[in-house]
Amino acid sequence: MKKLERSLGITSVIAISIGSMLGSGIFVLPGLAFEMNGKAVWLAYLLASICVLPAAISKSELATAMPTSGGTYVYLERTFGPLAGTVAGFGLWVSILLKASFALMGFGAYLSVVTDYDIKYLALGLTFIITFLNIFGVGKVSGFLIFIVGLATVSLLFLDATILLSPLSQIPLELFPNGIDGLVECTALVFVSYAGVTKVAAIAEEIKNPEKNLPRGIMFSLLLVTAIYCLTTFTLSKYLPLEQLRGNIKPIYTMALAFGGTTFSIIIAILAILTMTSMANAGLLAGSRFPFAMSRDHLIPHRFGILNQKFLTPVWSILLSGCLIAFFIMTMDVTKIAKLASAFIIMIYLFENLAVIFLRETRVQWYKPQYKSKFYPYTQIIGILSSAGLLYYMGSLAFKGVMAISIPAIVLFVFYSRKRTTRKGVVGIRGKRADLVEEDPQSSAHLETMDLSRDASVVVALLGKERSPEMLIEMGTSLLDEGPIEVAHLTEAPEQTDLDDFYEESAELKSLRRRVIAMAVEKGIPTTFDPVVSHDISKTIYDISQRLHCKWLLLEWAGKDRGTFTLHNPIGWLKTHLQCNLMIYRDNGVRYVKKMLVILNYHPIDRLLIKTAEQIASANKADLTFALYTKPCSEANKEMLLDYINDSIEEINIRKSSTIVDGYDKIGCIKSASVEYDLMLIGATSKYSPFNLFGTEEDNIIAKSACSVLAVHSTMTSGTVKDE
């Protein structure tokens, strides 16, 4: 499959990002904002920029992990599934078209300087022209766009600097003329001005060094545009009385007329017309691609995904988008258009922050961003809270607008899209897994490369991030009673990716196969190595353990279990549903095992733990120390606990000893004890809970241990003998 050439440098990224923002947000919107928040509009622009920052950072991460055309629609559809994708696709589509409508209304306002025609009819005329320009395939005029953006930027900065450096009548400024509520409501209104800051992320696969240039370009362009917005609105506040600014949808023209006269103001008006024409054209071009992309994913009728054979453009998608823009222009006033566009964009930014959290917390194997957002997850949480706050202050209009697009999208999904797609998204796959134990004729389709006709005593599942796959396999061979060991290398692919694309093995996988076979020959243990590509790692692991009737399944520990956001963790599900024993191994760099510490729990799992420890110690010729933890207690109680240990390990023939670990801090005490050993075994007795924010007790012991750790899980040992 051909890839797009990475030809865009940092300058192009900045130009595209600024070009997507600069337009009606500064030439039209300040007049509406002055009506809402008086002379403190510049502060609302600054606050809106701060609220945009988390989403800009999150989208930079998402774009480097999924550098594909489609941008936010793709990120949300892959994360939350086709239902969320349908709603997000519609929301993005409508918000972009609303912003284009707003730009066209601004175009009409500035064109009215030289003509007496009605603003709406002027906007409709330009809508008709750019719709057919897009159909004919001449919508992309990137060189002209960059020129206009540069000219507009320089002109605005020149105008601001000239006015501020000239003698001004010092009009007093208030920070909160309408209180905090007025400032926040105004911030929500002007939020639409920054809607294009992350649009460049949609072309991440065409950017050189995206892990550096994409976030830098987005941050720099956001900083520059924020400076232009704040400086220009501050200049307007200082130079013109509030009466001339309130409700004025061509405020820059008014300021230029007052400062430089008719000729100068007409030049500024022409520049504004060209800038907003380019923005409207880019909005229709980008907006029409959402129905096109959604139709290819079978979320809306196929007609919208068909390219015209002559013009090679999605004609039906462009026509529908153009008609919707015309509808907005004719039926809504300019303030309502700006508010609705802001509401949709704020909602989308909220879900982009959520997407980063979900993708990180579910540990999706294919999610490998080249750029990772700083201060995770606090950046995302701040973004979510600020977006939710802005939506709240926007009032009922924002709620009605969001519902107006969400309800039809949900109805469309239920009656059309749901029957034509089988994807679940990361959240669906990582949710409750009742589907894993249901009979499904396609359940083993992802295992077609494996021989499922034979059994394996031990299965070692490699997920690609193991510190030492050989050490994990070594632990697996220690558990063998009889029969072969199965080493399964699992690669998780996004649902939209055809598994056949992974037919060729990577160099790393070929090297791993060679090493595994060499180990098998050296130890004389029958071993099979199978690379498996799947859309669903949990389903694959479960199916392998079921089909091969294994006694043990080994996985390397990947960090603390976190169910805080997704409310269900795939490994947590496996711990309670597997029909075999599960062993989680934390490799702490130890490459020999001569001294082993076994932490008993006064629990039924102790029997399995003792037998397993004996087997591993025998294979490695290691000494065993069995221990029980207790809070500080009397010597009589300690003797009773030692009797329990000694009675439990009486039949073990390997060199062994017993001890008591006591103290008020269980995790700290076990950590201190682990310093003297190479390997520690613990029995996992804590049940998985979606509220394990900081991990289970076993997770914290595993994380802080000074030696390597094996955590033994078994569904056969539920129930507590004695609660310490």
Image (cartoon, helix red, strand yellow):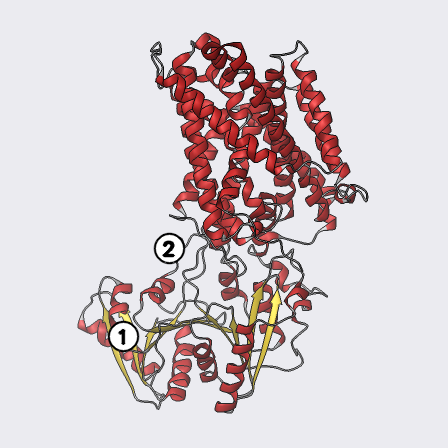
First in residue order: circle 2 vs circle 1: 1
- Residue in view at x 65 percent, y 42 percent: 86
Q: What amino acid does circle 2 point to?
A: Phe
* 393 or 66: nearer the viewer: 66
- Residue in view at x 55 percent, y 56 percent: 430
Disc 2/disc 1 C-alpha distance (Å): 30 Å
Q: Which image quarter: residue 610?
A: bottom left
Q: Which of marks 2 and 1 is in front?
A: 2
Give percent across and percent down for residue 53: 44, 38
Give percent across and percent down for residue 566: 50, 51
Residue beneath disc 2: 694
Report crowding for label 2: few under 14, some 14 to 19, many 20 or more residues within 10 A (C-alpha). Answer: few
Q: Which image quarter: residue 488?
A: bottom right
Question: Element at badge 2?
Answer: loop
Residue beneath disc 1: 641
- Residue in view at x 44 percent, y 61 percent: 687
Vertical position of residue 95 compared to residue 179: above or below: below
